[in-house]
Image: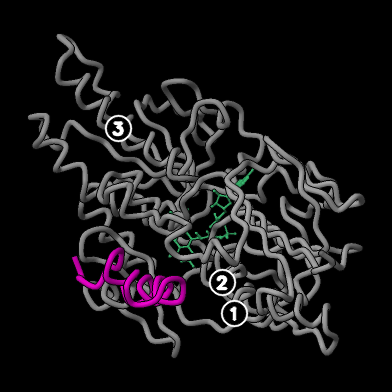
Amino acid sequence: GNKPKIVVLGAGYAGMMTTKRLTQQFAPEEVDITLVNKHNYHYQTTWLHEVAAGTIDVNRSRIMISDVINTRRVNFVHDTVVKINKEAKTVQLENSEINYDYLVIGLGFEKATFGIPGMEEHAFSIQSVDKSRMIRDHIEYQFARYRNEKTPDPSMLTIVVGGAGFTGIEFLGELAERIPLLCKKYDIPRQDVKIIDVEAMPTVLPGFDEELLSYAKESLEYRGIEFKLGTMIKEVKADSVIVGEDEEEIKAGTIVWTGGVQANRIVGESGFELTKGKVNVDPTLRAPGHDEVFILGDCAWVMNNETGKPYPPTAQIAIQEADVCAHNIKTMIYGGTLQEFTFDDKGTVASLGGSDAMGTVFDGNKLYGMQAKVMKNVIDDRYLFLLGGPMLVLKKGKFRPF
Ligand code: FAD
């Protein structure tokens, strides 16, 4: 028929919440809604550091899309996006081509390597369920090998993490919990294992509150994590990392890069202009020159007018953008005033493994340890509630502090 056709690409935080909101805003006879995703499941990107370290089961971090999206209302296409043809208003998928009147791009991030030689080929990244599961299995494989070789190379048990931002710190926290368990499982002394974080900036968690970042660093050091701050990674090889001005070579059996993200490469390859790896969208979240294309989450930069800087890439922001996007699509169809995005900061909490965490809450108050961990679980459960109601919280929630 002549119903406007809305196509949402990617079932991450931005894509899932936009789809959910669209089904709430429109009656079935008003619009056609299509959701395209690579997998038939949605995953919690914010839990992938736990999957990568092996501290939660893979299935805990994912939700079948058909469990939370009404597939009689939404045409779910289980396929991979290859390219967007914005002039023709079509999307090329691996197995078909679809057309749209309104497009929502929520294809998430991929690792940004800043041209560091070898990073692309030799470093893992915490990027999807598949890639995170590889990290978990690779680390465990190194333990098994170490145990079984006659004269094992001690560097097999060295894990180098590049970057000490939010993802790096959360991953280190999980490793600090997981490694002692692997040591027990494979009868390996804990002191044989080295976990080294290399960060170019002089502190961990650049931009975070001083007290909070010191707390995080001390908590991790206490559990045996070493930091090399103010140190650049110069090159990554198959079994080592070259760091710092003196080009020190650290031999390592596992190398994980958490130092940077950029928009899914499909966005740039489809001809959207990139600034530092992402698209600068207007305050209504639309791509410059393409009023019918909304770009959300980690594919976009949205300016914070108070600071003059773009908002950081977070799940919290991606979820809030979905509300504005769904509202604005309705406005474009029926008329009215487009809404501009403003961020309602509910606080940020980083988990540090086990029952430890730290962060700020909505009123700017700082939380540490178990209190922060409880808050982190509340934030995670709130999202599950928005997405799938109380049943989803019961099924996948983190209502227990550990
Ligand atoms: P995503 O949630 O990454 O979703 C992208 C989706 O697109 C995926 O489902 C993917 O399968 C799909 N896709 C990709 N390519 C294709 C394709 N070619 N075809 C079809 N589908 C495709 N933020 C917070 O606010 N709080 C936190 O505590 C926090 N912790 C984090 C911890 C870790 C380990 C990481 C990595 C990130 C964390 N973040 C956190 C950041 C947050 O996860 C991201 O900002 C958020 O995931 C962005 O959402 P998105 O919808 O843009 O992308």
The amino acid type of the residue labelled 1 equals Gln
Q: Are marks 3 and 2 in contact (CB under 8 Å)?
A: no
Q: Quadrant of the C terminus?
A: bottom left
Seen in the image, is 19 located left or right of residue 195? right
Along the line of sight, which residue is nearer the eye, 183 or 201?
183
User: What label sits on residue 20 in the rendered view?
Assistant: 2
The answer to which image quadrant residue 188 occupies is top left
Q: Is residue 164 magenta?
A: no
The amino acid type of the residue labelled 3 equals Ile
Residue 60 lies, in percent from the top left, at 31, 54
Instruction: Give the magenta range.
Output: 377-402
Q: Can residue 203 be seen here?
A: no
- From the image, tell me which residue sits under label 1: 24
Q: Residue at x 61, y 74 (%)?
A: 23
- From the image, tell me which residue sits under label 3: 139
Along the line of sight, which residue is nearer the eye, 392 or 277?
392
